[in-house]
Amino acid sequence: MTLATLAIVVGFVLLVWSAERFVDGAAATASHAGMPPLLIGMVVVGFGTSAPEMVVSAIAAVNGNPQLALGNALGSNIVNTGLILGLTALIAPIAVQSSIVRKELPLLVGVSLLLGALLWNGSLGRPEAVVLLLVFAGLIGWSVYSGLNGKEDALQSDTEEVLAQQQMPLNTALMWLIIGLVLLIVSSRILVWGAVAIAQSMGISDLVIGLTIVALGTSLPELAASVIAARKGEHDIAIGNIVGSNLFNISAVIGIAGVITPMASMPASVLSRDWLVMLGMTLALFVMAYGFGRQGRINRFEGTALLLAYASYNLWLVMSVTTS
């Protein structure tokens, strides 16, 4: 138990540090390669901040723990929307100016509904997982098109400011890209081992561990990125980072895990509790950030509501575990 707890702590620390190095190295390398700043912000940074969830879930699936992978993806989206955006809005209210982020919001709602339809029969086979990966490929294609053709978008100017502040030589960028990726894999293996060991020793399901401890840990890079961006006034990076990460979590993280190890049977609570809460938070985010004729924003009052929703969900989760 002590060794497993230590593994989780060490895994979290290495995961956060390596994810940040990986994203910085990837963004700088892409900039040296001549990639447009908007494309870097949409694809490289968005994909990079979801890398912890992807690697952790893939390793969990390979090790025969697909429910941990599913819990990680659903839980990360709940953490991203409820905890991270709620906390970020309390620190600095978020104004949504990017037209690209506004276009991603209905996509996120649609992908969330698609996931519910695929999970409706209580399982996720390889064909359903392939559907999610095809959606992921479509999202990447749309992101590349938007990144190459989007002009004067607020997300582009925010990304340009970040890249200017994080300039590094190509050799240094490649070094951090490689080191970050290697440590990302190593730290994910350590984290998964510790999480599974604790779940087994306490009689808690892999799903619940994925929804709580693992989801919170793999979402720490998004927390750091969004809070820092909001404090600097880079609002569209703060929310774009979360929306992009949530899209990738549903399509890529669950898709990859499902292809590796199909989920033949899932608890009914996945749909009636976890997916439902994720969908509810996604719809709330859509209403707040889209604007509907006004400036889209998440103010401190709405941020508090998101935090209370996140706290209520975790209380519901704890009560479900203790009474089962």
Image: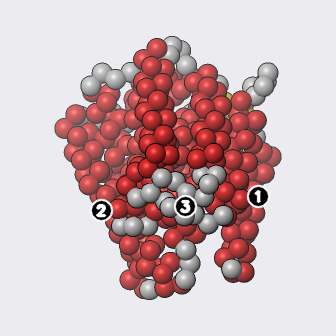
Label 2 crowd (10 A; few <14 / some 14-19 / many >=20)? some
Q: Position of residue 125 (x, y in %)?
A: 48, 52
In depth, the one of 119 and 296 nearer the eye is 119
Camera sees residue 227: no
Residue at which label 1 appears: 308
Which amino acid type is marked by label 2? Val
| Residue shown at the point (56%, 35%) measured from the top left | 240
Q: Position of residue 239 (x, y in %)?
A: 60, 38
In depth, the one of 272 and 309 nearer the eye is 272
Residue at which label 2 appears: 186
Camera sees residue 260: yes
Which amino acid type is marked by label 3? Gly
Quadrant showing the C terminus: bottom right
Sequence-wise, the earlier of marks 2 and 3 is: 3
Sequence-wise, the earlier of marks 3 and 1 is: 3
- Whole-angstrom CA distance, mark 2 to mark 3, is 21 Å
